Image (spheres, grey):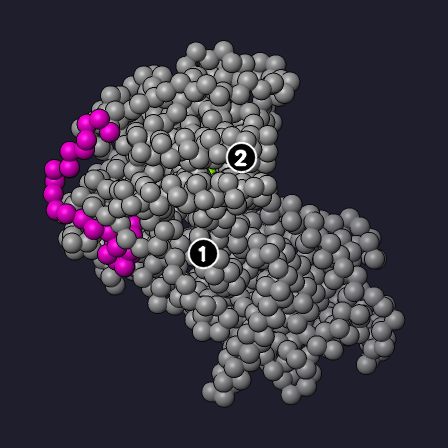
Amino acid sequence: MTLNDLQTGDTGIIQQIHGSGAFRKRITEMGFVKGQVVKVIKTTPFKGPVEYRIMSGTVSLRRSEASMIDVTFGPDPVVKDADALKPIITESTDLENGQKPGRKIRVALLGNPNCGKTSIFNRLSHSNERVGNYSGVTVGSKQAIVNFRGYEFEFTDLPGTYSLSAYSDDEIVVRQFLANHKPDIVVNVIDGGNPERHLYLTSQLVDMGIPLIVALNMYDDLQARGDKLDYLKLGELIGVPFVPTIGRHGRGKGKHRLMNRIIDVFEDREPVVRHTHINYGKELEYSINKIEQTLFKYRKELKGLHIRYFAIRALERDDFCIHKISSFEGFEDDVRPIITQEINRLELLFKDDIETLISNARYAFIAGALKETYKKGKRDKALSRTQRIDRVLTHKIWAVPIFLLIIFGMFHATFSIGQYPMNWIEAGVDWLGNSLSTLIPEGMVRDFLIDGVIGGVGGVIVFLPNILILFFIISLMENTGYMARTAFIMDRVMHLFGLHGKSFIPMVMGFGCNVPALMATRMLENRRDRLLTMMIIPFMSCSARLPVYILIAGAVFPNHAAHVIFLMYLVGILFSVVMAVVFNSTIFKKAEAPFVMELPPYRAPGMRMVLKHMWLRGAQYLKKMGGVILIASIVIWALGYFPRDVEYSKDYDTLIAAEENKLEKLDAATSQGETRQIIQSENEGQADKIRQQISMLEISRENEQQAGSYIGQLGHAIEPVISPLGFDWKMGVSLLAGFAAKEVVVSTMGVLYQVSGENTVSLQEKLGEQVYTEGEMAGMKIYHPLAAISFLLFVLLYLPCVSVIVTIGREAGSWKWSGLVVFYTTFLAWFVSFCVYQLGSLF
Ligand code: GDP
Ligand code: MG
């Protein structure tokens, strides 16, 4: 019987795990080991992954993967050999007593994903790194320096890792960090709610023999559940000090306690620290010793690293380790045959593969240690709350509609709530422009400030509230734990298109900004999945595209703007999925990666953190405004301002002078004692007409000047390419400028339209008023619905901004991929807009 045969609510006991080595190893690290009790919690729609309860965590697996795990029925766990459970701890003799490098302490934070490492890091160093309630939030390593009691601490926050095997890019980062940087102290953060699973990594670190402290995090949860963990005794047992911490609000004492403990361990004053060995049982120990002896003569090459650790890893067939030691002279003759011989001996003896044997031994050690020190509480409020919430949010049928509703709500809120502060900022920008125009005399300086700077930057700054709201909501999704559920809900659907469920998380993150989303693809274990996800992330409408959507949709569809915007996001998802299928059937070879994913309990989001992040995002947006957007606006303004000696089709100066003359005469007539009311109002009506005529003439002159400027010439040069899409030259130029950053599309429009219009009208209103002045379209609105849709689609699909292109190149390891993205997205954008506009025009 396999795990797949169990129904919702059933429990089973794991007997054996089949499948590839990588799969078995990954799943073992998550707690699926022989003898463990596993409970089926729930299934997802469309025969998607299934949620299981294992140890004290929740993990989801695909059905195909569950079928590789043999189980037997039973609520009663198999009684293990009592002796095997006893932790046997031996003192080590080969402890290195190396010199301490001054008073600088380099501390690395290490632990499973989602145990609160980054929260602790932020507390310790007053940093604001990204925190989220799902695995894979931290990408790469982050460092911070803190001074405390005369020591300089260098903290490094690392991505989460279940073990020290190197599967995903994240895990490789961690291993390489340990190997290359050799931190003085490793703080192993564990989730107090699931010590059994989290101590697996601890056991590997103990083997490694590096100075270690365990931060027993989520201590608040542990206490709330009524669990009893005698961490002092546990620490003594394995020779590692345990410090309870609360990453979320661990102010003052908890934080200083941890730092004091670090100093004590660093200075060798900590009484608990003892170098210990995990005893793997008689047979395994025999093999480990044998390999250790053959490795002994290479101790110089191993540069003080633990020989026993290498022996264990070599026995585990760990590529990383074998690769390292295989470069030693004589390895092939002396060492490799012994390793192979011992592996064969053990596998034959126990009729199981060596990786499983070793991890079983590790879990047995942990179980033994916990047996004496850990007592689970009766009430698990967090768990039952999570299950209640999940009954709705991951419901078989309702999960997907609810997800869509949440996303729709998100955009609706972004648009409708954002409208109010947006109007205030708009009013402020107007006021600034008007005051400046009365203060500064007419001329180039005034044009530069009002048309260039305020037109450009002011056009973009009004969208700040929308962006803040969007990031606030995404941050909520990340921090409550819903984000992890989206991957779980969507795995089946994504699978239909050859995507991995986990790809969905970076995709949703892409709504915020594509750059961190591209980095988040590191959580995907398979390179093919990663590349494929990176190729389609640019279709996820990032917050920089939002201003364009709001501007155009608001101008052209004032009553349905939120719907149009939501539609654009959906179309983006649709295209990403379609392109995934196209890529799958062309350049990417299909390869399955297991869907093994933890579903963390729902947590109330740390509001301080969420708000802080929102603020940081806002600050980033403002910085962009003072940087790339300002520069782009100035460049666009200058290109539109010069040359000044454009040839006009009419003699505007004379025409305007003539009109002004008429106006003067009229004024004179009015003031010459004509008192009859009717004539006065008639005259006023006439004066208004003349004034209008003058402003029309001025606008046409500006338009002609602009059309003759450098940017106008550029615009007209690209007209043949863009006019079949329904765009005029100003739209074309804005799109070109948008290459620097998508917001620049808006700032460019701000500059281009600022010139030709009254300052009191908002950019949105101006767009709505634009009409063609010449050619067969003369008199027609430039921004009519069809052209607007075509334009929005183009903005959605066409080439991503410079930072995205650079990130793709760096993350994919080759500029080839960046090039591919640039070309295919732009071509696709043109093609889609062309089809939409041309087909639409037929009706
Ligand atoms: P990382 O993946 O290990 O870096 O974990 P994060 O720092 O991103 O935190 C994961 C989640 O756990 C976030 O939702 C945090 O708010 C939450 N968290 C962190 N520390 C604690 C804690 O001590 N108690 C509780 N209840 N939640 C915590
Ligand atoms: Mg983190």
Percent coordinates x, y for residue 206 in the rendering: 42, 27
- Identify the disc placed on residue 526: 1
Residue 33 seen anywhere in this rendered image of the structure: yes
Where is residue 204? Give x, y as percent.
41, 33
Q: Residue at x 55, y 74 (%)?
A: 828
Say which of 224 and 321 sits in front: 321
Q: Is residue 418 above or below residue 404?
A: above
Which amino acid type is shown beneath numbered disc 2? Leu
Q: Nearer the viewer, residue 342 or 60?
A: 342
Quarter-wise, where is residue 443 in the image? bottom right
Furthest residue in direction right, as rendered? 645
Q: Nearer the viewer, residue 733 or 185?
A: 185
Which numbered marker is on residue 178? Answer: 2
Q: Quadrant of the N terminus?
A: bottom left
**Segment colored magenta:** 58-84
* Magenta run includes residue 358: no
* Residue drawn at 70 percent across, 77 percent down: 718
